[in-house]
Image (spheres, rainbow, N blue to C red):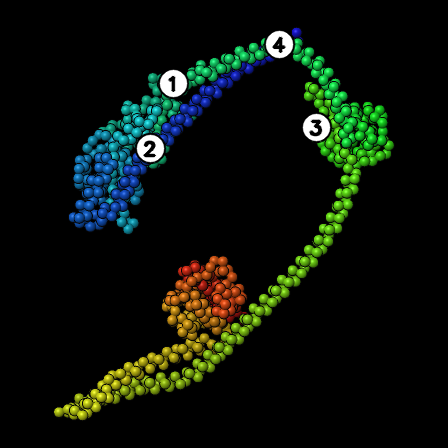
Amino acid sequence: MKFRFIFLALGLLALGATITGGAVYFQTVNALIHDQERKGTLENIEHLDKDLSSMINTTQNAVTVLAKMWSVQNFFNTQRPETTADVYLALDDFREAYGATRCCLINREGRVIAASSDNAQVQIGDDYSLQPFFPKTLAGKRVTSLTQGVRGQEPAINLSHPIFFKDRVLGVALLTVPLVNIEEELVSHATGLVALTDEHNFVFASNRRGWRFKLMGAATADDLAALAKNRPLMGEAPLQVPLTFNKVKGTAHAPNGKKYLFSRTPLSSTPGWQINYFQEEDRTKARLRQALFGKTGMLLAGMTLFIFGAIAYLFRQAELFLRQREEAEQKVKSANLFLAQILDVAADGMRIVDNNCNIVRINKTFAAMTGMDKEDILGKKCHEISWSPYCNKKKCPLQQIRAGKKRVEYESAQESPTGKIINCWIIAVPLHDINGTFIGILESFRDITEKLANELAMEKAFSEAHTLAEELAASNDQLHRQQRNLALAHDTLKQSQAQILQQEKMASVGQLAAGVAHEINNPMGFIGSNLSSLAKYLERITEFIRALEAKLPQEPPDEELAALRKKLKIDYIMDDALHLVEESLDGADRVKKIVQGLKNFSRVDQAERVAADINECLDSTLNIVWNELKYKCEVKKEYGELPPTVCNPQQLNQMFMNLLVNAAQAIETRGEIKIKTWGDQDWIYTRISDTGSGIPEDKIKRIFEPFYTSKEVGKGTGLGLSIVYDIVVKNHHGDIQVESEVGKGTSFTVKIPVIVAEPAGQ
């Protein structure tokens, strides 16, 4: 009887579950069908948006092409007969290609100045200045808007684009296309009701003709007035589509009781225009009925009958179950005996502890580990036979497994009542009866005393090896530090030696240049003075001879004297003598400039730091290195107004000389060096640019390192740019920046501070 009541209760539960499942199935199917309908609606809207946007974008791009045609822009500028003919031909082609109702060009006053020849809806001189699209397009924007036909009632789309010339709007290109193609697209591709609305929610195209020229939803008074004025309703206020919308549920209701699923999506090609899509809900209900009363519904009913049959079958099997249970108990006893035999041959000590911490079973290995007999162990508490620090605490394996752990592993020293201590690795797992009830734990004890001794010996050996390795690493690190210090000292010594040698060379060159300049300056002074006097004397002699010939003419002329005059080329000598003296004076002046440049470059007559003009330093340096530059490059100077600054002019001359020589050496055949100076209140800037081979990116960070050079062996010491860096950054507290591109050239920008007076203590 007990089992009968149990199975009856199960039957009632199954019936209740079936009814509940049916209700859940209905709600699930209903939600799924609605989701599928909305997904299909969104896919239809996406296809419509793609197709309609493609149609509108194609026409918009056509207007853009028309506005950017050279003949159209030239027409606005010149309006010659040949230009006018080209424009009319282009307008005819565009109107025919896109089926437009009008294609024309409008000037800045809003008057039509050109139109396609076969266009009946537009005439030359028509005024479009008051049309909504015109001021927006004249402001430089591409505009797409709805319009009423000029001489017809059918609505169309105005696509306008500004015509630019040198960032100035000359006029507007206009292309008007009918909405017939768009409505044909709606009829051919939409499975539901579709309406296209503009920014005022005005329906300008739909696959339901009755909705055309009506409002889709509410509108303000200003919207109604604008629509009545600008839409094809002949001044009448538009009607509304007879639908009531529920924005929260996304539905719309018609007066006749029909219900629609409603979706609205912006048209991607035209901001403000929207696609309104309506799907009849009757279609959704039909799909729901088909799902409920189709194969799935029949399957659900069949499952209900199957459940009831299964309950009856299980009831009849109850007695068989009881007999099988007795047989199972016998099998459990046999299994326990088999388990005991297995435990006895296990190498690890094993015991079973019940919920009350009593030992109920052990194997022979565990008894041998404790040194006690099996009878003395069974029935005793677990902590009485082998005590560990975990006993009677939260970490006790029995308590941990009761708390939910599936396996406990730990290492512990076990002490038995005989005083025997063994280091063990212990594993404890839960035990359950046939009903799944927790009845105790099974513990496994593995003797690891010898293993621990071996590990301790290995740890000691490893520790000694680790200590020795650390000592060796410390010695190695100390040796590496000493090597780095020696290398750094060696590099510093080489750099200092090279800089001192370079400074001594420059000092010797400066003294030699100053001496040469002083020695050359005196003889060049009287050479220039003598040449000037000689020029004056030649002018006077020539003037006297000319006057003498004019006063004493010979009649007849002396033929012998004339022949001698011609043979000695007296006339040529008188004319060329002055030119020779002028050229000699020019050469003397050039020598004087070179001497002055040597003198300025050496600066031996000046203090170490004085107020100097950077532009003069550059000119002095150019005079010195001109022979190095003139055969390979053209020098362009772009000097700015610079304030004088306290500096070491001799060092700056050396710095500029190194940069100019490097620039010339970077030019392989023939190129250009550009020198530009400028300044502000705090800094003076000098940029030296060349059109040479440039510096690779991987080498540009190292060019200021001492002894580093990218030139071939024997063509550079690697000290030039290092000295430049020291003079600018260390000696003058300035900065230097490098910009380079391989194959195009290099620019060095030197930044020197403006110092009005020498600081105290310098």
- x, y percentage for residue 101? 22, 35
In primary-sequence order, the first of circles 3 and 2 is 2
Residue at image coords 39%, 80%:
592
Q: CA distance from mark 1 to mark 3?
A: 59 Å
- x, y percentage for residue 434? 70, 19
Q: Nearer the viewer, mark 3 or mark 4?
A: 4
Q: Are marks 1 and 3 in contact (CB under 8 Å)?
A: no
Question: Which residue bears the numbered disc 2?
Answer: 51
Residue at image coords 44%, 17%:
291
Disc 2 residue type?
Asp
In this image, 711 relative to 181: left or right? right
In primary-sequence order, the first of circles 3 and 4 is 4
Q: CA distance from mark 4 to mark 2?
A: 66 Å
Q: Which mark is residue 403?
A: 3
Q: CA distance from mark 1 to mark 2?
A: 28 Å
Q: Nearer the viewer, residue 497 or 365?
A: 365
Q: CA distance from mark 3 to mark 2?
A: 66 Å
Question: Which residue bears the numbered disc 1?
Answer: 282
The secondary element bearing badge 2 is classed as helix
Q: Nearer the viewer, residue 298 or 236?
A: 298
Question: Which residue bears the numbered disc 4?
Answer: 315
In primary-sequence order, the first of circles 1 and 2 is 2
Disc 4 residue type?
Phe
- x, y percentage for residue 215? 31, 27
